[in-house]
Image: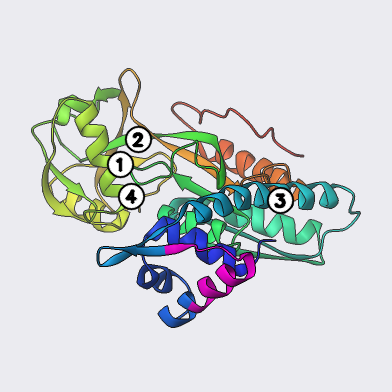
């Protein structure tokens, strides 16, 4: 476990200012500055210096951060090895995920882990992908399920282990009676001239839809904004627009809409990643949870292509 003062320095590197670090932590700006001064005095080096109206990290700070990353990884490897020797798990294990994962993939794993390990407190948090990364980095969550967006950290980011869990195919949702309804498959380009329901700008759903349409060769006519599947389905049902829907998502049957499988090379899909802190992917609880999650995802794909799974075999 890293010294909290070092974690503050890591956050400063990521967010760029004392005020920004305070905004994402429980500290006040003065408390953040105090932690940095304490660390500087403890290490007997200068860690920050003025840069225009702001501050920047010194060369010494970069050295501290480089070693801190290695130390954090080693700590997580230590915890994983020690956990492998345990006969009974206790303490707290927290999983987080975006809305679909929190609805369809994580509850079964949560319940099963609680049943198998009575002394273990298992928590579940629903959060946007960007917040999931923050929760994992801050040790507020042990495992996150995120979908890849333009804002996701690169796979080379030394703070995290990111591994592909599955590909969740996207379906096109159209009103009943639409000229595309009744087809077995369509391409996304077949709906290029339609009005679209797309999530709020900046949201993961918005990024997902726009990226898929652009990859298909067109920019969607963003006529409506809806972050909830039910709201989007209601708009589609009225004949106002079409929308994309991940295979794991569900729509109430009361809406007269039709889901059509999309084809293409590659077929549009959202990538769902399993994220832990660097070095924690081998923790036995993480492996067990991911086995349960993989089993849940397989059972939900009752038609169409099955989710692509590269890792994490099912644990019986």
Vertical placement of 85 versus 7: above or below?
above
- Rendered residue at 30%/66% (across/down): 54
Asked whether residue 232 is drawn in magenta, I would say: no
Give the residues in magenta: 34-48
The alpha-carbon separation of the residues under discs 3 and 1 comes to: 32 Å
Q: Report whether 122 appears left or right of 220.
A: right
Vertical placement of 301 versus 87: above or below?
above
Residue 136 in percent (x, y) is at: 56, 56
The alpha-carbon separation of the residues under discs 2 and 3 comes to: 35 Å
- Rendered residue at 35%/50% (across/down): 251
Secondary structure at badge 4 equals: helix
Disc 1 marks which residue? 208
Disc 3 marks which residue? 76
Residue 110 in percent (x, y) is at: 65, 58
Mark 2 or mark 4: whose residue is earlier in sequence:
2
Disc 2 marks which residue? 170
Q: Nearer the viewer, mark 2 or mark 1?
A: 1
The alpha-carbon separation of the residues under discs 2 and 1 comes to: 10 Å
Mark 3 or mark 1: whose residue is earlier in sequence:
3
Rendered-image quadrant of the N terminus: bottom right
Mark 2 or mark 1: whose residue is earlier in sequence:
2
- Do callouts 4 and 1 mark residues in contact (Cβ within 8 Å)? yes
The alpha-carbon separation of the residues under discs 4 and 1 comes to: 6 Å
Disc 4 marks which residue? 204
- Do callouts 2 and 1 mark residues in contact (Cβ within 8 Å)? yes
């Amino acid at each position: 476990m890293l010294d909290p003062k070092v974690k503050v320095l890591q956050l400063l590197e990521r967010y760029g200012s004392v005020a920004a670090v305070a905004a994402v932590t429980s500290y006040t700006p003065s408390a953040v500055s105090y932690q940095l001064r304490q660390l500087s005095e403890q290490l007997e080096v200068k860690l920050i210096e003025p840069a225009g109206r702001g501050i920047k990290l010194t060369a010494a700070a970069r050295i501290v951060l480089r070693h801190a990353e290695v130390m954090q990884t080693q700590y997580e490897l230590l915890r994983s090895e020690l956990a492998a020797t345990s006969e009974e798990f206790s303490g707290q294990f927290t999983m987080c995920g975006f809305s679909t994962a929190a609805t369809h993939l994580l509850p079964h794993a949560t319940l099963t882990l609680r049943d198998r390990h009575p002394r273990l407190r298992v928590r579940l948090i629903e959060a946007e992908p960007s917040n999931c990364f923050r929760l994992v980095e801050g040790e507020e969550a042990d495992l996150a399920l995120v979908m890849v967006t333009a804002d996701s950290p690169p796979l080379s980011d030394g703070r995290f282990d990111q591994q592909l869990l599955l590909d969740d195919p996207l379906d096109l949702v159209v009103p009943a009676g639409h000229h595309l309804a009744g087809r077995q498959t369509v391409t996304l380009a077949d709906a290029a001239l339609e009005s679209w329901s797309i999530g709020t700008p900046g949201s993961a759903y918005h990024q997902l839809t726009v990226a898929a349409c652009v990859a298909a060769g067109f920019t969607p006519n963003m006529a409506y904004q809806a972050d909830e599947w039910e709201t989007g389905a209601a708009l589609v049902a009225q004949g106002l627009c079409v929308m994309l829907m991940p295979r794991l998502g569900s729509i109430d049957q009361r809406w007269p809409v039709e889901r059509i499988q999309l084809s293409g090379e590659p077929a549009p899909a959202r990538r769902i990643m399993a994220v832990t802190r660097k070095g924690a992917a081998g923790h036995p609880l993480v492996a067990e949870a991911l086995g349960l999650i993989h089993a849940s995802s397989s059972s939900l794909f009752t038609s169409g292509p099955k989710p692509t799974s590269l890792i994490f075999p099912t644990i019986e």
